[in-house]
Each structure stands twice: as structure tokens, then as C-alpha cells.
Amino acid sequence: MPLRRSTALVKWLFENQHKFQIGRACSSSLRYKEQEEAEPAAAPAKPRPDLTPDLSFRFEDLQVKLAAPYQLQPKPEAQDLGFGKFFTDHMLKVHYHQHLGGWQKPEIIPLENLSIHPAAKALHYAIQLFEGMKAYRGIDDKIRLFRPDLNMERMNLSAQRSGLPQFDGAELIKCIARLVQIDQEWVPHSESSTMYIRPTFIGMEPTFGVMAPDSALLFVILSPVSVYYKSDDDSGVSMYADPSVVRAFPGGAGNRKVGSNYGPTIEVTAKAAKLGYHQVLWLFGPDHELTEVGAMNIFMVYVNEQGEKTLATPPLNGLILPGVTRRSVLELASQWEDITVAEEVITMDRVIQLNKSGRLLEMFGAGTAVGISPIGKIGFMEKEIHIPTTKQQQPVFQRVKDTLLAIQYGHVEHPFATVIS
Ligand SMILES: Cc1ncc(COP(=O)(O)O)c(C=O)c1O
């Protein structure tokens, strides 16, 4: 063979060696039995011509596969629940594949582990989001959701921000309601516990480009829960305010419920716990504006310059998650004649001055997971500020809490609650 031809052949072999399976050894010392261990090739899924990426999945397409008796888990005692430690027997899954026409049929199946490619975008660039909702078993034994339409609205906004496809929130609510009905025996028979609902949406495309994924998975899991955290004293929870860290910044995604807002809070939350505080009070800017507390929106009750009792919370300026509870508190309290409701900037200076003059009455956090949580103390710049939240005769936080619980547990009929079972 002339030298030039054999060099060309060697070059060709070198460039094409990946195409030859025979004799390729695994780089590990353990030989990989490719043939034996390979998954049987899945039959290619048929595209659904009636779906386009812009349209939603539909409840009417829901397929249900119930768990076999041996797959059913024992239900924990109410006192052991904690927060998000136990999961029910079923889950909801909806796949999105652009090349198959977009959204696929939703399915309820026995709870299972996910199979995910290690290059999936959710794992690398946090192209993912989640929601937090609850199902409450009322005094009439009916199960209710609380304003689920607002969670769906927020979920679609988070999806938009992360390049994940939109969907019809009303269709997802119907699928979630069916899931809760199937696992309804898991909804605690108690007014101190609930069923936490965790819709989650992750980018599945296994490629490294930082761009919108062409495949995604929306799933919903359910967890019976009791208290989010325990406060041992009745003076309320304590907050650690560290001006050197921020949760969100202008133009960022603090107003969206994306996982990337939460992972980076762990270090300072752990520091707060080490210093003896329950949660972090998130500040922003040179004036130390209060934005949120832990995973809750913040409220303050004070007597204003005109002598009016005022319930205030910072405005939705892009740094703050638009909480379903926050909005509900504002809407409910604006009906009360004895209190003025305000969305206004609250700085640490203002808190300190109001507290010094005796006009600061209460501070509390509000969110689905924790509920209404009275704040008793703030650690800020080496000082401790004591808030008389739980010392009030008729605290506003208690009235807000009672009003919300009455709606959620069906003590009163209210449009905020939707009976699903
Ligand atoms: C950062 C943050 N703020 C506020 C809230 C409260 O929102 P919601 O009332 O919708 O639960 C949450 C919980 O979702 C949160 O994670």
C-alpha cells in the first residue's frame, strides 16, 4: 500500500473509531457489560398532531395508574409529620417534548424516582421552578384548596422567566385536585396539619447550552405536614438580619419561585441558626430595606403619624415574591374598618425609631408553608431589637391567622377556598 494511502486510512480510522463498538474497553478497571446492561430500546413515541408547544396539556387526557396494594405506604402519626418528610402514594407527571408536539398527556402514577440524564439543564443551570400550596381537610370533612389560581399564575411567570413552556393553570388545578382525591386519606384529619402540594417544573433537555430546554417535566408530589419550624417560647420567632447578604436584587428573579433563589440562602440561614435565630430577615440596599423573612412575606403593625393603626408590607418591587398569603392578608385586612392597610418601604431605621417611640406594635411573616408567624426579636448589627408582637391585647397577626384558618378549614364559606373533594 502506498504510504500516502495508508496514512489516510489510519487518519480515517482515528477519526471514525467511535463508530466501532467492538473491543472498546471501559476506561474503568471494571469492564462494562454494554450488551447485557443496556436498556431495551424504547419504542419511539408517536407525535401528537393535535398539540403544539403553545397549547396546554388537558385534564380530559389524564391517565391514572393506581398503586398496587403492596406499593401503599403506611401513614405516619400526626405528631411525627414535621415538614416534607413523608410523601403520598401517587404523583402527577406531565412531559413536554417539543419534537413530539409539546405537552403530552398528564398521568397520575404510583410515586417513583425520576430517571434524569446527568446533562439535564435543570441540574446545571437551575432551569427549574416550584410552587407551594396546601390542601386542608375542613371541619365538614371536605378538602379545600386555597386560591390555587394564584399559584398557577405565579408558576407560569416563573416558567416564562426560565424558558419553560406555558400551560393552562385551570387544567393543572383539575389534575392536582384528582391527585389529592386519590390520596385523600393522606390529608390529615386535624386542624394543625395539612397536605402540602409541591408542583415542580424542570428542564430535562440533556445539552449544555444555556438556553430554553426543548424537553421538560412538570410533576406534582404531595406531603402531609405539620409545623414548619418549632418556636419554643411564646414571644414569637427570632430573625437574624445580616446586611452583608441579599436574597434578591433589582432585575433579578427574586419575584419568581425558582430554586436558584433558595440554594444560596442556606449558608446565612445556617449562620442564623448557629447564632440562635429561627430565620433570616432579608434586607436590601443602603437603607436596609426589609424585603422578606425566610420564605415568607413580612408585615408590620404600627401607629402612624395620624394615630391610625396601620398594617404595612413592602411593595412588590421585583425583590419580593408575590405571596398568595401576602395578597390575601392585604385583601382581607382592607375590609376591616379599624385598620389602615399600606404597601410601603420599611427600613431598619424606621423599625428602630417606631420601636423606640412605642408605636411599633407587631411584626409577622406570612406564607403557605409556615402560615402566620409572629416575630419577637431581630438581631441586627450586633444589637437585639425586641418586638412586642405577642404582648398586644388583640394582636392583628392573630386576627389575620384566625381569618385565614377559618376560610381554609371551612369554618366560613369564602371565595378564596375551593372545595375539591
Ligand atoms: C421567598 C418567599 N417569600 C414569600 C413566600 C410566601 O408565599 P405564599 O404565601 O404564596 O406561600 C414564599 C413561599 O412560597 C417564599 O418562598
Image (cartoon, helix red, strand yellow):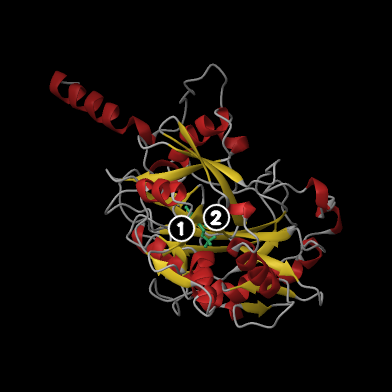
Question: The disc labelled 1 sits on which kind of residue?
Answer: Ala
Q: Quadrant of the N terminus?
A: top left
Q: Quadrant of the C terminus?
A: bottom right
> Residue at horizontal 35%, vertical 34%?
244
Which residue is denoted by mark 1 in the rendering?
216
> Residue at horizontal 61%, vertical 62%?
395
**Residue 25 versus residue 45 in the image, above or below:** above
> Residue at horizontal 47%, vertical 29%?
22
Residue 364: mark: 2
**Residue 118 versus residue 7 in the image, above or below:** below
Q: CA distance from mark 2 to mark 1?
A: 37 Å
Give the SS element for disc 1.
strand
Give the SS element for disc 2.
strand
Residue 244: mark: none
In the image shown, does 235 or 82 lie closer to the viewer? Answer: 235
Question: Residue 200's spot in the image, x, y percent?
Answer: 53, 57
